Amino acid sequence: MQLIDTHVHLNFDSFQPDLATVRSRWQQAGVVGLVHSCVEPEEFSSIQAIAHEFPELSFAVGLHPLDADKWRSETAEEIKSLASSDSKVVAIGEMGLDYYKADNYEQQRMVFEAQLAIASELNLPVIIHCRDAAVAVREVLQKCQENAGAKLRGVMHCWGGTPEETQWFLDLGFYISFSGTVTFKNAKAIQSSAAMVSSDRLLIETDCPFLAPVPKRGERRNEPAYVLYVAEQVAKLRQETVEAIAHQTTQNACKLFGLSI
């Protein structure tokens, strides 16, 4: 059984002491591919180094909405330059809107739109962070698709929306990725969303080192091997086998990100 963890942050300090051991565990769990997301340009070199150390790792480049104030006149060119020069870059992001932790709405939106334009220009998928901002994210994506004259490709990562909101993004052609939050006891809306997403748009992730899934929720650090628990919970919610979920989500990740497994 093969799994792909479509959203990791392995360059964080918590992984530095034992990353080789963490890799051994994800290999034992059947994780054959990983997509490393990006928070800000200062991470580019560290993420790139990890991606070239581990053949199974691809990565994205972009600016997180909670770091929107770090956008500079040269940021767009930095993102485009690395995305164009390194074949291991498979997406732009993570980007989006976070209205839960910040209220600089206009600045976030400007940075979001700028990165969508880059992705459209380079024909790369986007990794979208959306927290308490589904209406606004939907509006920005619709506007971008209308202006570009074509549908953007991408994923709503670590999805936490309602089934109604989920359908909005499915209608826009996006994939929906579920993290360890889908295993949480009170995450009823997320679980309902996981049950209704069409099979060809379903992805799984850990968002490690955050959000360790049940039964590892008490641990301080999440890791890629635990994506198996996400797959098991999604399988249970959809009344499918974990093998079927692993196969489908691996196929979907390969299609969206252009991975060869």
Image (tube, rainbow, N blue to C red):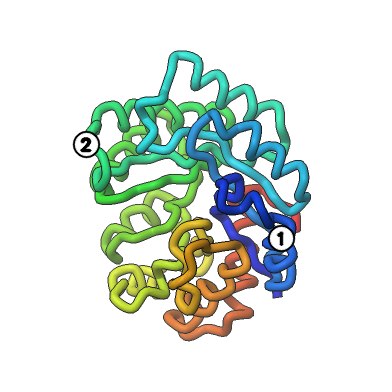
Of all residues shown, which one is farthest toward the top? 73
**2 or 1: tag closer to the N-terminus:** 1
Callout 1, which amino acid?
Arg
Position in image of residue 57 (x %, y %): 69, 50
* Quarter of the image that includes the C terminus: bottom right
| Residue holding disc 2 | 103
Select label 2 or label 1 by which is in front. Answer: 1
Q: Nearer the viewer, residue 168 or 227?
A: 227
From what the image shows, is residue 208 above or below residue 78? Answer: below
What residue sits 70% from the left and 44% below the top? Answer: 50
Determine which of the numbered discs, if any, sits on residue 47 in the image.
none
Residue 174 vs residue 123: left or right?
left
From what the image shows, is residue 172 above or below residue 113? Answer: below
Q: Nearer the viewer, residue 1 or 165?
A: 1
Position in image of residue 113 (x %, y %): 38, 29
Callout 2, which amino acid?
Asp
Q: Quadrant of residue 139?
A: top left
Q: Nearer the viewer, residue 62 or 143?
A: 62
Task: Report if the CB atoms under discs 2 and 1 are less than 8 Å apart.
Answer: no
Count of labels in the image:
2
What residue sits 68% from the left and 57% below the top? Answer: 18
What residue sits 35% from the left and 38% below the top? Answer: 66
Q: Nearer the viewer, residue 157 or 47?
A: 47
| Residue holding disc 1 | 23
Q: Quadrant of residue 61?
A: top right
* Quarter of the image that includes the N terminus: bottom right
Of all residues shown, which one is farthest toward the front? 17
Residue 102 vs residue 123: left or right?
left
Residue 40 vs residue 243: left or right?
left
How many angstroms separate mark 2 from mark 1 (CA)?
A: 37 Å
SS state under label 2? loop
